[in-house]
Image (spheres, rainbow, N blue to C red):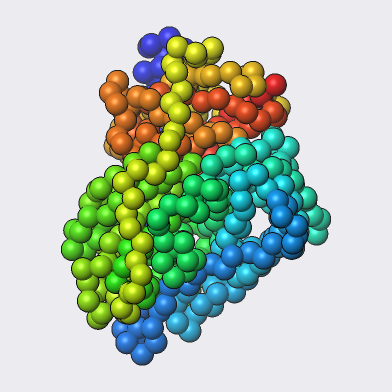
Amino acid sequence: MNKNRKWYTIIAFSALLLIIYVGYFFTDLGRGLETMGENDSQLVDSGRNAETENSQTERTNKLPIPPLLEDKNPEEGKAEFDLNVQYGKKEFIDGQETTTLGYNGDYLGPVIKVDKGDDVKINVDNRLDEPTTVHWHGLEVPGEMDGGPHQVVDPNTSWQPHFTIDQPAATLWYHPHLLHKTGEQVYKGLAGLFYIEDEQSKELDIPKEHGVNDIPLVIQDRRFSENGEMPYDLNMRDVMNGFLGDTVLVNGAIAPELDVKNEVIRLRLLNGSNARSYDFNFSDRSAFHQIASDGGFLEKSIEMNELSLAPAERAEILVDLSEYRVGDEIVLRDGNHEVMKINIAEESTDSSGIPESLVDIVEYDREEVVNTRRFVMSGMGPMVAINDKQMNMDRIDEYLNLNELEEWIISNDSAGMGMMGETPHPFHVHGVQFQVIERNGGEPPLNEQGWKDTVMVESGEEVRILAKFKQKGLFMYHCHILEHEDAGMMGQFLVE
Ligand code: C2O
Ligand code: CU
Ligand code: CU
């Protein structure tokens, strides 16, 4: 496209947006105002939250802990799991039933935990009356096992992916990836955690007791209707920027409470939201240590007071509660908004430490780069694109060679699109854990210097990554704002 045409397109597009936006505003003013209020990028403390707090005085709202999924294969080095995709009903709000989707339950899924080196088999049984897929986000497995939009599981059929775990300990996750339907299926409840353990994760002096001091936290934002339903109805803002809810859920609970001992606890945070990013901190601004990023442990633990997570990103943090007394509480927050309460409920007898050095990460050598590719993310709403293209199942966008080092330059060109603001795009690559080597020409922040599979690229930013693809097959790269992905902000690459 030449420069002038590009500008005409941008101006025409902005004008179109303005018309749609104004039209939307006036035709549906009442509802529009209501939803817009709810939708402000800063969460508002809605009446609903207040309500929940009141009812908590009678009924405590304990943080639900997703169970570890039973491994059906007793053989050492092998693991087999059953995962049923099903409809559910769940009471998020007292006295109101919500229609949901879940894996082996009403909402979200169990934690699948495997060891490095395991041969894993999973029986995915689709009990819905619509197709779905199950994608293993962050796993390095062959293309046919990846669970992307090509591995459709039709209603009342099953899919048996199998693979060998060949990557370090990490907190990964799984979720649907059906073309144009990912946003809706994830929103209704389809998501779960996938842990890999290895010798190092077992040896490190860190908390390891699931649900006791090693706590999974799936953070999502949702919008409930008057009758407690959770309809996936996109308003104009959602179409543009991705779905933003007004109520934050942790493991499917609104403003829950977690009881722990006064010791070091480990929180495994997954931003499982469709579009919202979070800035996590604690109410007393106390420091904590990040020990892992998307794809595994960092080399050294990093002390911080605030942690940002874009959609699909994970982080493991250690929080030292040894200075607190039984009866104290701290609040995990997003900015100024309460996400979850942590009650110091019991005296600890034996706390783990906060190791300073964790694992060795061998840095890729930039001199060995064989291929450099550019990925320019642009547009908003239905116009989102990567390299000016939208997802086409019949078109392979990039061809890669197995085990060759690649440098990818990922930029976000969504600036200047007018009053709708600038859109951030978290870029995700399937089948690989990569290393971020540059952010806007400089060194990336310390907590991006470990293994990553998703990297936030704000409007106007440029990020460079190095990646070596060790699995063959067809994979996706895309924006992990699910409404953008569903609108076509995705491409395919073939590794051979
Ligand atoms: Cu979290 Cu393409 O996926
Ligand atoms: Cu993925
Ligand atoms: Cu995006």
302 is higher (above) or lower (below) than 460: below
Towards the viewer: 392 or 199? 199
Figure label count:
0
Measured as percent of width and height from the top left, residue 193 is found at 54, 56
94 is higher (above) or lower (below) than 449: below
Residue at image point 54% right, 42% down: 168
Q: Quadrant of residue 347?
A: bottom left
Asked whether, in this view, residue 457 is left or right of residue 67, the answer is left
Q: Is residue 353 visible?
A: yes
Residue at image point 33% right, 63% down: 264
In the image as oriented, which residue stretches furthest toward the bottom?
58
Asked whether, in this view, residue 162 is left or right of residue 252, the answer is right
Asked whether, in this view, residue 255 is left or right of residue 232, the answer is left
Q: Quadrant of residue 61?
A: bottom left
In the image as oriented, which residue stretches furthest toward the right?
157
Measured as percent of width and height from the top left, residue 260 is found at 36, 73
Residue at image point 36% right, 18% down: 7
Towards the viewer: 146 or 370? 370
Residue at image point 58% right, 18% down: 404
Q: Quadrant of residue 146?
A: top right
Towards the viewer: 251 or 382? 251
Q: Is residue 172 visible?
A: no
**The C terminus lies in which quarter of the figure?**
top right
In the image as oriented, which residue stretches furthest toward the top?
2
Measured as percent of width and height from the top left, residue 57 is found at 32, 87
Measured as percent of width and height from the top left, residue 105 is found at 63, 69
